[in-house]
Image: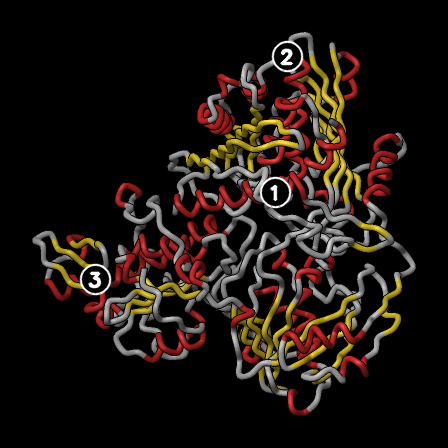
């Protein structure tokens, strides 16, 4: 993979527009009109340029990737989708991450690259629907040019590895055809896409385009970028949600060598959660990071809680249980089939269990940061690894009043996202600092805004705390005839303009299994009050409900003395399609059963009853993907060792199997690490965790040496992959721990609870 030339988005566009002979193709260039627009685009007609491909005369093929890549592998997968349809030589492809594409349009911003979003497993499904057409169009134009050169019909030509090839063996390199192809008008209708049996890149493993740069330390993250000679800003933030500043020694901070200014930050009122600064803060601006940190230390800032204090996790749990036990409490009923109360009265047996999951942080490897430069009345430039550049634009535009032509947002690859970079609080802080009054000597200099790890953990948008109570009614044949699940949590949608009766959507999926499998089914949601900021987390809204439901299914199997695998397959029943109103449906029970069987076979599930170790299994349907985990653990004197982990996924057609496997492995490790050890706790109204010493991400023990992955071959439409490996990992682990120790862990983090119960 060639990647020596690294151009910023604006330089890339200028270079493409200013180089004669280049063929540039963008989404939106195919027009069903009497005279389609020409595709040379060697002028200012950038309204037609979307995620695109440029074929240069020297044979290199530049592919722009619209969606941010924070480790999901979108830079590789999206580029290969275009390259496949183009019949490109992958070794001559140069991938460029596109910053935000925006321009003025009738008084409103026009986003010329379409959707630019990552972190919710939508990049590949969305790309599959439109990016193939860009590659197909470029190939069509190149073959038309080759047909004229060779004097044969274009239908008798094929593309292969960056060449146009005739039936008699004559061939012409794409680079030699670029100039001629750029002068050919677009077809009146989109060219046909390649047949799947001709794929050469899709379905074949490819290493991440940035892998070498990542492992050698040469990849430039936002914190590595410079605009001139930037100054550095760090912030002292109020640790109490809704709290205020009490005292701060600004004079002492200003006297620290290297400190230029001390600036107060006040959050904008009335803004949607995630679109403004979270807390009152004092920013220290200095010549370098060390001086800024010393200045912050000299502030000796003290803070006061607000009128309302954030409750502890224990208090939230108590409130949830009170709601469950209060017949007058009115939940939001998410789904109701049949009559669970009547089923319970007639049941031969009924079982109930309560599961508790803590607040969880994102703890991305790269903490939030951005580089910003404000040229008053001229333009603003922002460099940040946002997962939602369009949301970042909204914040910048609102706070500065600038139009699209004055806002330049560049989006380098990020060091992990998991939903954290969907929030724009750190962007809002940076804009506020840039707009604040500062000494003249730094007024026009760029500012690098940095978060330390304690900043990151104490001011995250956490995965919400959750309590689940599930009860099941069994008939005389041990079948599940009734299922009632209740969940209480502080919704991640609170404060984001969502109606009260829809707050459950960030925490639950209405049609998630076993809905549709049980004749009498009910799902209720209770919203808890909290001041902590919360948001999307890897696998939401599937992750917390799946831990409860897949653990409970295991408990039911144990109660009726059934093999947990056989019991799950019995519940799934015959192969059929279940209605599913969420993204990716309907649910194919045969595909779900298949991933369960494959995971069990790989782990040698036949040992389940006689093994000295514990074997556990769980499955999940996540955004159209079918995933199962099978885990083997051994008990130890002080906990457990995880011996083996198997993850099987059916995601439809896998664009890049190697990248998919990496996502499944990483998501599994992330899920296990979180389940074993991680919890955000609140005491005296504020978060207690300040670093990896008390938030121990992925310790060496008891984690497995590897995650064995199986990717199911499929010709179905592809789904995303970045989050799907999370939901079923934790319940599979808890189920294995039960088999190994006879201790049923219903409260996370697991190791802490296991030590308490043993």
> Where residue 245 sits in the image (x, y, percent)?
85, 70
Whether residue 314 sits left or right of residue 426 in the image: it is right
Q: For mark 2, give the secondary structure.
A: loop
Whether residue 375 sits left or right of residue 166 in the image: it is right
Q: Split into 4 quadrants, where in the image is the C terminus?
A: top right
- Residue farthest to the top, as pictured: 476
> Where residue 18 sits in the image (x, y, percent)?
34, 80
The residue mark sitting in front, 2 or 1, is 1
- Which residue lies at the image location 75% right of the left edge and 22% below the top edge? 339
For marks 2 and 1, give the CA distance. 30 Å
Whether residue 355 sits left or right of residue 365 in the image: it is right
- Mark 3 or mark 2, earlier in chain: 3
For marks 3 and 2, give the CA distance. 68 Å
> Where residue 205 sits in the image (x, y, percent)?
35, 46
Determine crowd level at label 2: few under 14, some 14-19, many 20+ residues with C-alpha closer than 10 A.
few
> Where residue 278 sits in the image (x, y, percent)?
75, 63
Residue 550 visible here = no
Residue tagged 2 = 561
Determine crowd level at label 1: few under 14, some 14-19, many 20+ residues with C-alpha closer than 10 A.
many
Residue tagged 1 = 673
Residue 741 visible here = yes
Residue tagged 3 = 144
Asked whether the residues under the numbered discs 3 and 1 touch, taking CB atoms below 8 Å apart as contact, a structural biologist would say no
Asked if 588 appears above or below 99 in the picture, the reply is above
Asked whether the residues under the numbered discs 2 and 1 touch, taking CB atoms below 8 Å apart as contact, a structural biologist would say no
């Amino acid at each position: 993979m060639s990647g020596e030339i690294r151009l910023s988005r604006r330089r890339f566009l200028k270079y493409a527009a200013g180089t004669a002979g280049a063929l540039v193709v963008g989404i939106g260039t195919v027009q069903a009109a009497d005279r389609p627009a020409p595709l040379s685009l060697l002028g200012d007609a950038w309204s037609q340029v979307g995620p695109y491909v440029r074929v240069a005369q020297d044979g290199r093929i530049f592919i722009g990737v619209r969606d941010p890549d924070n480790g999901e592998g979108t830079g590789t997968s999206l580029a290969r989708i275009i390259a496949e349809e183009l019949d490109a030589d992958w070794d001559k492809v140069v991938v460029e991450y596109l910053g935000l594409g925006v321009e003025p349009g009738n008084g409103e911003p026009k986003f010329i690259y379409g959707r630019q979003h990552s972190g919710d497993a939508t990049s590949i499904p969305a790309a599959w629907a439109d990016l193939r057409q860009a590659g197909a169009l470029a190939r069509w134009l190149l073959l038309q040019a080759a047909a004229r050169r060779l004097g044969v019909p274009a239908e008798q030509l094929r593309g292969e590895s960056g060449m146009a090839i005739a039936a008699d063996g004559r061939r012409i390199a794409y680079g030699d055809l670029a100039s001629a192809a750029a002068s050919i008008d677009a077809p009146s209708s989109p060219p046909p896409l390649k047949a799947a049996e001709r794929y050469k890149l899709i379905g074949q493993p490819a290493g991440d385009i940035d892998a070498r740069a990542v492992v050698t330390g040469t990849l430039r993250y936002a914190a590595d970028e410079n605009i001139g000679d930037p100054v550095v800003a760090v912030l002292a933030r109020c640790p109490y949600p809704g709290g205020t500043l009490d005292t701060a020694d600004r004079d002492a901070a200003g006297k620290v060598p290297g400190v230029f200014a001390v600036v107060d930050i006040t959050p904008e009122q009335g803004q949607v959660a995630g679109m403004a600064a979270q807390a009152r803060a004092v920013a220290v601006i200095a010549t370098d990071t060390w001086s800024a940190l010393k200045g912050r230390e000299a502030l000796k800032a003290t803070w006061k809680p607000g009128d309302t204090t954030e409750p502890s996790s224990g208090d939230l749990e108590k409130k949830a249980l009170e709601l469950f036990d209060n017949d007058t409490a009115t939940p939001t009923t998410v789904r109701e089939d049949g009559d669970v109360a009547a089923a319970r009265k007639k049941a031969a047996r009924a079982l109930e269990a309560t599961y508790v999951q803590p607040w969880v942080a994102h703890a991305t490897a790269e903490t939030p940061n951005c580089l910003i430069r404000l040229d008053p009345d001229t333009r603003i430039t922002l460099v940040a690894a946002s997962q939602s550049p369009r949301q970042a634009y909204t914040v910048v535009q609102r706070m500065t009043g600038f139009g699209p032509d004055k806002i330049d947002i560049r989006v380098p690859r990020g060091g992990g996202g998991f939903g954290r970079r969907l929030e724009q609080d750190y962007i809002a802080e940076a804009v506020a600092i840039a707009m604040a009054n500062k000494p003249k000597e730094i007024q026009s200099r760029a500012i690098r805004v940095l978060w330390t790890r304690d900043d990151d953990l104490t001011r995250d948008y956490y995965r919400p705390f959750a309590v689940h109570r599930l009860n099941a009614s069994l008939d005389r044949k041990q079948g599940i005839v009734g299922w009632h699940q209740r969940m209480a949590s502080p919704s991640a949608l609170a404060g984001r303009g969502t109606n009260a009766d829809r707050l459950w959507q960030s925490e639950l999926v209405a049609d998630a299994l076993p809905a549709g499998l049980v004749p009498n089914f009910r799902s209720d949601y209770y919203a808890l009050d909290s001041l902590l900021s919360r948001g999307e987390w890897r696998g939401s809204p599937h992750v917390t409900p799946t831990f409860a439901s897949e653990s409970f299914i295991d408990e039911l199997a144990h109660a009726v003395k059934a093999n947990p695998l056989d019991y799950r397959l019995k519940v799934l029943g015959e192969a059929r399609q279940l209605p599913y109103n969420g993204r990716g449906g309907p649910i194919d029970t045969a595909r779900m059963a298949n991933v369960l069987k494959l995971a069990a076979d790989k782990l040698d599930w036949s040992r389940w009853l006689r093994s000295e170790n514990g074997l556990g299994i769980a499955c999940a349907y996540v955004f159209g993907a079918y995933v199962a985990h099978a885990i083997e653990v051994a008990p130890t004197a002080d906990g457990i060792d995880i011996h083996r982990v198997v993850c099987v996924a059916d995601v439809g057609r896998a664009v890049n199997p190697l990248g998919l496997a990496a996502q499944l492995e990483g998501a599994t490790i992330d899920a296990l690490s979180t389940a074993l050890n991680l919890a955000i706790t609140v005491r005296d109204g504020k978060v207690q965790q300040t670093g990896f010493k008390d938030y121990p991400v992925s310790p060496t023990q008891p984690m497995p040496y590897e995650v064995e992955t199986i990717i199911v071959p499929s010709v179905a439409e592809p789904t995303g992959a970045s989050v799907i490996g999370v939901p079923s990992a934790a319940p599979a682990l808890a189920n294995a721990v039960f088999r190994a120790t006879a201790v049923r862990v219903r409260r996370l983090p697991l190791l802490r609870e296991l030590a308490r119960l043993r």
